[in-house]
Amino acid sequence: MPTQSMSGKAQTPSAEARRIFERRCDRYLRRLLPGFGAVFGIGVLCDGLWSDLVESAQSPASLVLRLGLVAIASFAYRMPRSGPPPAVRAGIVYLVHGTALAVTTRPLADGVLHAMPLLFVWMVAFGLVESRPRRCFQTLAPTALLYAALGSFMLPSAAAPAIWAASLAAPALALCLGGRLLHLRHDLWLRERQLLHACRYDSLSGALSRQYLTELARHDLSLAQRHGRDLSVAMLDIDHFKGVNDTYGHAIGDAVIRALTATCVKTLRTTDYVGRLGGEEFACVLPEAGAEEALACAERVRDAFANLRIPGAPHDLRCTVSIGIAVRRDQRDWETLLREADGALYNAKEGGRNRVKLAEPG
């Protein structure tokens, strides 16, 4: 259900927006992790085959150990959604694969040094998969520290500087590339949200667009029919709106339209929503509302709008609204319900305006 502010526009707090973007990044990582994990596992095994060519006496035990560690890592990206977060799974995959290389190449002469190019590529590639700097650093740091320690304690001094340099350079490069990619992803995400908002909300009033209102209303109407629940539709029309535009100008007319949307959002229930059909006509969808409750909601809107001082308008300007209500009966579709509400609105206009009328059962 869309959230509308006092002005009628959808408002998402920045903290909530960050959480939405974080969830998007987690979904992206969850989708890519199986493929990348499989590639890294194959890389470990291929490195083992290369070790077999270099020093065949150690290959059987090395390959068995590699296969075991690759199998352990595979469980990390095959876990169900209810398991650990994707970032934790990624950390397990990288740490286990990195350990597999370290353990199985250690007995070879300068084996860890020869494994560093593969590990370097992995770390940099991970920056493209997990572009959030903190998560990327938390995942790569244990593997980088492991290889830095190997460079200090398990290799000849001549090879240590190369190991240290690679252990520092790979995470740094991954963070730089990931940070840039994160910025591009976030910018694209914001543009998508702006485009979606432009499609779903009326630019003048902040109410739902007619297309989005219809989409939501049909969905709620289908649920109401399936479960035998109440649902009402209120159609609103600003009285003598053409006279407001002619007398005070279109800027004041626009302010009146915005004021009606704000009044609906402020006065109706949190489950209700309002959309602009066109011009000065609006429709409110009231889920779980029968005739009595819908009439009470509409009366609150009518009374609040009649007593509202329009922002920026002369003090003597007071506007009213006529409202027609239709209640779901049988298997009526959205178009039929809207047509019944329009008929009730016509009766409210003919009855003197500034009043609420309920559609007669038909």
Image: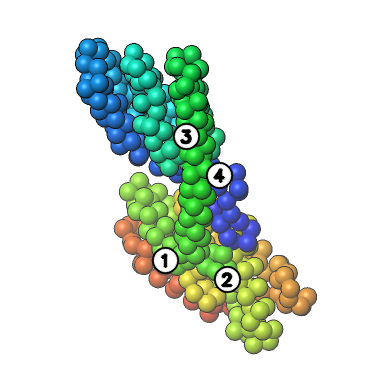
Asked which colour scheme the image uses, the reply is: rainbow
Residue drawn at the location 47% of the way across and 34% of the way down: 170
| Disc 4 and disc 2 in contact, CB within 8 angstroms | no
Viewer-side residue, 51 vs 144: 51
Q: Which quadrant holds residue 76? A: top left
Residue drawn at the location 58% of the way across and 75% of the way down: 238
Q: Secondary structure at mark 4?
A: helix
Q: Amino acid at mark 4?
A: Arg
Q: Label for residue 170?
A: 3
Q: Left or right: 16 with respect to 75?
A: right
Depicted 276 relative to depicted 246: above or below: above
Q: CA distance from mark 1 to mark 3?
A: 50 Å
Q: Tell me residue 9's x, y (percent).
A: 58, 60
Crowding near the residue tagged with mark 4, few <14, some 14–19, many ≥20 C-alpha atoms within 10 Å:
few
| Disc 2 and disc 3 in contact, CB within 8 angstroms | no
Q: Residue lying farthest bottom? A: 246
Q: Quadrant of the C terminus?
A: bottom left
Q: Label for residue 18?
A: 4
Q: CA distance from mark 3 to mark 4?
A: 28 Å
Q: Amino acid at mark 1?
A: Gln
Question: Between disc 4 and disc 1, whose residue precedes?
Answer: 4
Q: CA distance from mark 2 to mark 3?
A: 51 Å
